[in-house]
Each structure stands twice: as C-alpha cells, then as structure tokens.
Image: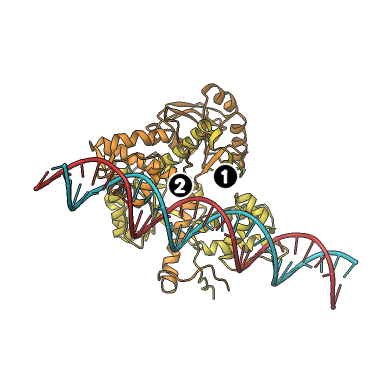
Chain colours: A yellow, B orange, C cyan, D red
Amino acid sequence: MPQSRPRIIPEATVARLAVYLRVLAGLADGGRSHVSSGELASAAGVNPAGLRKDLSYLGPCGVRGVGYSVSGLRDRLTDALGGERSRPCVLIGIGRLGSALADYAGFASRGFEFVGLLDTDPATVGHRVGGLQVRPVQELEALVAETHATIGVITTPAEVAQSVCDRLVSVGVRSILNFAPVALTVPAGVDVRKVDLSVELQVLAFLDQQRDGTPPLLAPLRAAQGVAR
Amino acid sequence: MPQSRPRIIPEATVARLAVYLRVLAGLADGGRSHVSSGELASAAGVNPAGLRKDLSYLGPCGVRGVGYSVSGLRDRLTDALGGERSRPCVLIGIGRLGSALADYAGFASRGFEFVGLLDTDPATVGHRVGGLQVRPVQELEALVAETHATIGVITTPAEVAQSVCDRLVSVGVRSILNFAPVALTVPAGVDVRKVDLSVELQVLAFLDQQRDGTPPLLAPLRAAQGVAR
DNA sequence: GCGACTTTGTTCAGGCGTTCACAAGCGGTT
DNA sequence: AACCGCTTGTGAACGCCTGAACAAAGTCGC
C-alpha cells in the first residue's frame, strides 16, 4: 500500500525535502500543529509555489484552506527520504575534518551512524574519536562486510581518494560522500556527492570581486532576492 | 588593464572554473605545459564541450590544434576568480567543525586566510587553534574593522546563526559561507552560500532507497513527463 | 608551400528546473 | 444549507544550463 510513487523526484527537490524535514522537526518541537506553505517556504528559504510543487511529488499531503499537518508531513517526508532506519556509515580519513564529522551531532540525530573510522596513519589508528576507535584502513573490506555499511564518507587527501573509493565500491557500498578535492570515477549504479569547501570560498571571492569591479557595468539584473540558498 | 569582461558568468560555471583551476595547479606541479579540453574535462569530471563553453566566458584562451597552456590558463583563471590577493576571513563558532576548518590547508593555499576566530564559550575562548587565538564573539565588530575581513564563515549552532550573520552584514561583510542548518536572510548585495552536510547524506539515503525499492518500476530511461493525472 | 589532422570556439537544440497564475477543495460562518 | 475566504495542487510559460554537432584556425608532415 505505501508502495505507490511512480513519479520521478528531481534531485534538487530531494535536497529541499531534507531541508523541509528539518524545519518541520523544529516546528514540531515548538508545539505547532499546522503550517502553511508560505510560512514553511519562508523558513526554508525557498519560493512557496516551489515548495508546494516539491511536496506534490509525494502526492497530496496538505489540506486546502488549512495547510499542512506538521507531524503528518514530517512522517511523510521521513518516509520518502528513506525512513527512520539507522544507516551505517564508514568514514575514511580521520584528519581534522574527519574527526569533526565523526562526532557531528547533526548526523546521528538523522539516523546516520558511523560504525567505523579508518585511517592509514599509525599515529591516528587506535585513537578514540567520537566513541569509536580508529582502525587501520586495511580492515576496510572486513569492516564493511561485518557492519553492512551502505554509505562511505571520504575525507582523505586527494591522492588516495580514488583508491579508497574503488575499494568501497568493490565491497558493495553504493553511496559515497566525497570531501576530497578530486572527481571520483565510479561505475553506473553508484552515487557520489561531492562537497568542495574551497570551491565554495572561491565562488564567494568571485562574487565579491564582481561586485567591486563591475557594478556600473552589469549590476542591474543581479539584485533582487533577499534570501540566499 | 584587463578590464573587459562584459559577459555575465553563470554561477554554476564559476564553481567549475574553481575546479579547473585546482586541476591545473596539479598539472603545473607535474611539469605539464599543455592540456587538451578532453583531458582537463576528464580530470575535472565534466563534459569536454561544457568545459570549453565555460572557458569561453573568459574569452579565447586556448590555441586551436594544440590545447591550453597550463600556466597561461591557470593565470587567467586565477585572475577571473578574484586574483591572488589574500582574502581575510573570520570564522564564528569554534566547535568541532569550526576547528577543522580553521586549519584546513586547502583554504590557505588558495589565498583564504583566517584572521580571526570567535566563539561564545568561555572554555573555548583563549584557546589556540590553527595558529590563532580564539577571541570572544563580542569583539566581532572590532575584529572585522581592524582586519578588513571580507568573508565570514559561520559554524555556530543554528539558533544564533542569523544574529551572527546580521552582525557581520552590519559591519560590511558581504560574503558569507554558512554551515549552520538554517536559511539566512540577508539584504540584497550580500551573497550567502550554504553547505549542509546532513542534507548531503539524506540525499544519498534517498537515492539508496530508490535503487532498492523501485528498480523494476522506473529503471528504464524515461518516458513522458510533466503530464498530469 | 600545401594539405590534412587536431583541437578550439561557437551555435543549436533539448531537457530541467523554477516561477507565475488559476482553478479546485475545504473549513468556518451566517 | 449555502456562501466566502483561504490554501493547496497543478498547468503552462519562461529562462538557464547542459550536451551534441559544426566551422574556424593553427600545427605538423611532406
């Protein structure tokens, strides 16, 4: 019965659904029972019409004239995004960034649990980070097999990211979050999402320069929109 | 003066230009003098035609029949993305993630230098992170004024992110990188880029579920879309 | 010096995502 | 019971970006 979602959901929409879900969780904690698309969109930083369109991919889930039930919509979104079941993750590369991610509360609260931390550095292996002991990267295959991890997070230096990725894929991991500044090559059927922190800063630097250097030239169309994405 | 770039560069292109720049830096270190669009595109993980289109926004910068000069293109990209001048950044919220970012080598090597670290927690203030001493967040305005920081990085909890953002904007910071899971509201003329780590994982979880749950249903290419029911 | 090959730069069409605007539907009120 | 206002859901247009095909241009070989 719950199996009836023949429509394809665009990836951009999926990302926003995750944002809506977080906003809803906050509203639920605040005791709210209903929200309108306008209010929810404002909190999420998107257009109200776009929000409704996003939600429409899940089928009707609001009541006209009233709005959306906070708990109802939250449950529906939770279900659409993969349910509440805990998703075991392995993290490879326990440097500064890796350590920070290992005990980032935002992950655990959403059902993402790190079940293994791996590193090559003998000085790091054995150390305890976020409640887990760092293990040597040689144990990657065994670890994935025993924990049935489905998500791999790569925070290694760029040079070894591809080989780590290959090993993850070879033992069945099909979802990879990559923080290393390289483009990973994976076979079809494997999803990679890349987070590139220095690119983000560089884009900001570009926009900054553009503001300072060419406002008289092409300033007109660039204003508008008070909320950023 | 190289002041002649009347064309507007799409933001998506800017982000890719930053990736190309990094790949080029690696090639230059390797001693390469020329690259073709195909090779560069492969290393960056994009389509060759798209890469050429991206570069065309900067005007002709390759030689037909030969390819691109590694150093020449690198310089051109560096210039387009804001030059090599050091950009002072302030970082607010020195938790796990903030500490990791504070001494992330990838930033410094691209001209982004943290000139101030701020936090509210008395236990964190005064501590030394990545070569800088953490200062109380009350000094934010003074710090920005004295260092002329142009970029603010927010790694605070969600509840205080907006107020920190407002204070940054009020003292002239117009570029903000936000890691807090909230949509920041800013006046026109201020750019915000948001990095949401748990959203990335949630998208992966969705794709994972979609693979497992609906391969027999919508695996094929695709049919009509936009038609309603 | 000329021809052919290689690679860029550009143009074109297609898909995707976003935004706007309107009709349908539900609750509250009289 | 019927009306009115409010909000959702959807259809359609617009613009952006992506992916492929073509022409210009430069180099290498003979």
Q: Chain of mark 2?
A: B
Residue positioned 54% across, 73% down in the render: A2
Residue positioned 64% across, 50% down in the render: A42
> Which quadrant holds residue B29?
top left
Compared to B71, does A160 lie above or below?
A: below
Residue B182 visible in the displayed image: yes
Crowd class of label 2 (few under 14; some 14 to 19; many from 20; radius 10 Å): few
Compared to D3, does C4 lie above or below?
A: above
Q: Left of A185 or right of it: where is A62?
A: right
Residue B96 visible in the displayed image: no
Quadrant showing the C terminus of chain B: bottom right
> Which quadrant holds residue D27?
top left
Per the image, label 1 sits on a secondary structure element best described as: loop
Which of these two is toward me, A57 or C5? C5
Q: Which residue is mark 1?
A: A228
Which three-letter amino acid code belongs to the residue tagged 2?
Ala
- What's the distance in space between the residues labelled 1 and 2, CA to CA? 15 Å
Q: Which mark is residue B182?
A: none
Q: Are marks 1 and 2 on the same chain?
A: no
Q: Position of residue B87 (x, y in %)?
A: 46, 29
Which three-letter amino acid code belongs to the residue tagged 1?
Ala
Which of these two is toward me, B45 or A67? B45
Q: Position of residue D15 (x, y in %)?
A: 54, 52
Quadrant showing the N terminus of chain B: top left
> Which quadrant holds residue B185?
top right
Q: Left of B226 or right of it: where is A132?
A: left
Q: Which residue is mark 2?
A: B12
Q: Position of residue A78 (x, y in %)?
A: 55, 61
| Label total for image | 2
Q: Left of A2 or right of it: where is D27?
A: left
Per the image, label 2 sits on a secondary structure element best described as: helix
Residue positioned 67% across, 52% down in the render: A30
